[in-house]
Image: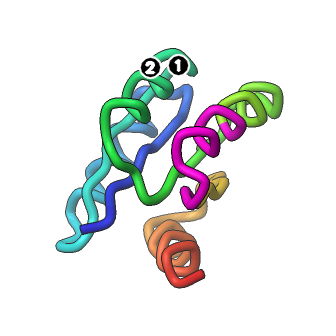
Amino acid sequence: MINILVIGRHPQIMETVLRLINGQPRWTAEGALTDEDALVKFNAADFNLVLIGGGVAESSEGRLRKEFVKRNPQVKMIRHFGGGSGLLFNEIEEAIAQ
């Protein structure tokens, strides 16, 4: 099972992305709308991948990346700016394959 933390700023988009990811048989996802929530969730579970959505500032991404890598140096992080479910799935598959 691939465990994915999705970080975003828009509740409606988060709901859609989580539904799409959790609809896949080998993936499970949790969402975080704030940096603080993302840190709490990341420290409480073993995530293979962090997906950073639109609206997350570069400064937040840098801070989160630094903290996540301290806890899990192998964690993979990707940015997703939209583009439909096909693109989302391809981005996740590519990140997992690396």
Left or right for 57, reference 15 = right
- 94 or 15: nearer the viewer: 94
Mark 1 and mark 2: span between their CA atoms?
5 Å
Q: Which residue is mark 1?
A: 34
Q: Which mark is residue 72?
A: none
Q: Which residue is mark 2?
A: 37
- Amino acid type shown at disc 1: Thr
Q: Percent position (x, y) of residue 33?
A: 48, 24
Magenta segment: 65-75
Instruction: Tell me the residue at 52%/15% (across/down).
Output: 36
Query: Is residue 66 part of the magenta span, yes or no?
Result: yes
Residue contact between numbered discs 1 and 2, judged by CB atoms under 8 Å: yes
- 88 or 51: nearer the viewer: 51
Instruction: Tell me the residue at 62%/39% (across/down).
Output: 70
- Amino acid type shown at disc 2: Asp
Magenta region, mostly helix, strand or loop?
helix
